[in-house]
Image (cartoon, grey):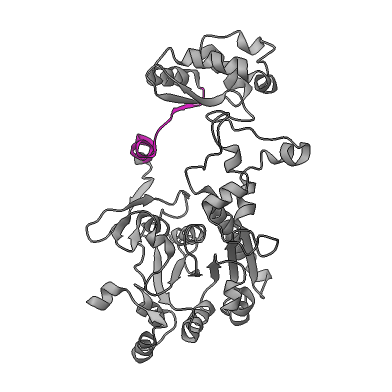
Amino acid sequence: MTTVQRPMNGIRVLDFTHAAAGPFATVMLADLGAEVIKVEKPGRGDGSRHMGKPMLGPLESDYYVALNRNKRGIALDLGTPQGREIALQLAEKCDIVVQNFRPGVMDRLGLGFEQIAARRPGVVYCSLSAFGPEGPLSDRPANDIIMQAVSGLMGITGEVGGGPVRVGAPISDFSTGLFGTVGILSALYVRDQHPEGQHIEVAMLDASIALMSNYLPAVAGLGETVPRCGRTHAQIVPYQAFECSDGAYVMVGAFTQGFWRRLCIAVDRPEWPEDPRFETNAQRLENRSVLAPMLEDIFRTRTRDEWLEVLKVADVPASPVLDLHEAVASEQAQYNHIVQDVGRDGIACPTARFPVRSSSWPLAESQTPPRIGEHSVDVLADVLGKGEEEIDRLLSTGAVGVDRVDVAS
């Protein structure tokens, strides 16, 4: 049987990223088949190792494990000339370099785009940062929760009349990683046209605001504000969660006129589509304060499961409102194998499977994320062709670190 390779087989990535936005970009490249070499500081490693709960070991938190599967790990002290030189030598062997330090940090280390492109012509170099390389906030530190706040994302999220609420997922981090991946793949597609190399830059602020593109014409063009709508939507009615008689919630998304008409029939209000207050979405928005309470009263007359069956028969978009545990355990998630195990030594560690499916290449069978410097020796030998004596010398200087479990053995 012919083995079908994933689309990025043969592509090598040098990964200087840490925390969430950068590792989320590089884990997708790894899932697509690229060889990703993760560079960490000896001893402490990626800061995400210390976020959340220990999963596979004291320095392998659930947060770290989720974003670093399918990677090889090398520990380099970039504060030493030897460590920086090894990094440059590795960059010469890579197609892609990804980093998410503050602007200027990698340049000062001698590992910025210009310095690496001089030694690796044609490299695709991706920089992810909070605010980008220029502007009054360019040198400020930030993370997902800061970015949700400063982008306006938190400002439009929350209950009606209530205070701002953070989106539960690290959406600013992950969207930055996604846009970074799009930029990297686009640059790879045209790299033959750019023998000098390409520098891709994505700012978390830009990515976060881009997630609210549907609101920008009215906000930036007309000066309007986006109200906090809680379980409802600022632009579509009815498009919200309704509480049912058993205290559970059903989400209803009647976002077209056809779905609105079907919903009216399903809730035994066939006259509503001709009511001048509710005929169009614009009219329903204007009269939300009238329509929503009537719908709320109707949905409180049956249980969630009863309503789900009614809406299924009516072909109206609807679903139960589940917590994450229920969603992961759902029949649909289980059928599609959305969760996979990347555990080690008998310790189970479920993570999200790469969500892109293709008829041409298989889903990745994920490997356990690396310990700090777990593959240092292998990378030096396999990628750089260094012999045992030179490797021992580099290890003795402290510029290169190895997995402490290996050292103990």
* Residue in the image at 42% along x and 57% along y: 67
Left or right: where 157 falls relative to 217: left
Task: Using the rendered view, name the quadrant where residue 381 is placed.
Answer: bottom left
Residue range corresponding to the magenta coloring = 316-333
Left or right: where 223 falls relative to 117: right
Q: Quadrant of the N terminus?
A: bottom left
In the picture shown, does residue 2 fall above or below 227?
below
> 194 or 101: nearer the eye?
101
> 259 or 199: nearer the eye?
199
Magenta stretch encompasses residue 78: no
Q: Position of residue 251 (x, y in %)?
A: 48, 27
In the picture shown, does residue 389 fall above or below 221?
below
Task: Using the rendered view, name the quadrant where residue 332 is placed.
Answer: top left
Q: Position of residue 260 (x, y in %)?
A: 59, 19
Q: Position of residue 179 (x, y in %)?
A: 59, 55
Say how many tags the image has.
0
* Residue in the image at 37% along x and 58% along y: 65
Q: Quadrant of the C terminus?
A: bottom left
Q: Is residue 3 visible?
A: no
**Residue placed furthest toward the bottom:** 389
Q: Position of residue 390 (x, y in %)?
A: 38, 90
Magenta stretch encompasses residue 320: yes
* Residue in the image at 65% along x and 62% along y: 138
Left or right: where 389 falls relative to 165: left
* Residue in the image at 47% along x and 53% along y: 360
Left or right: where 38 falls relative to 116: left
Q: Is residue 72 visible?
A: yes
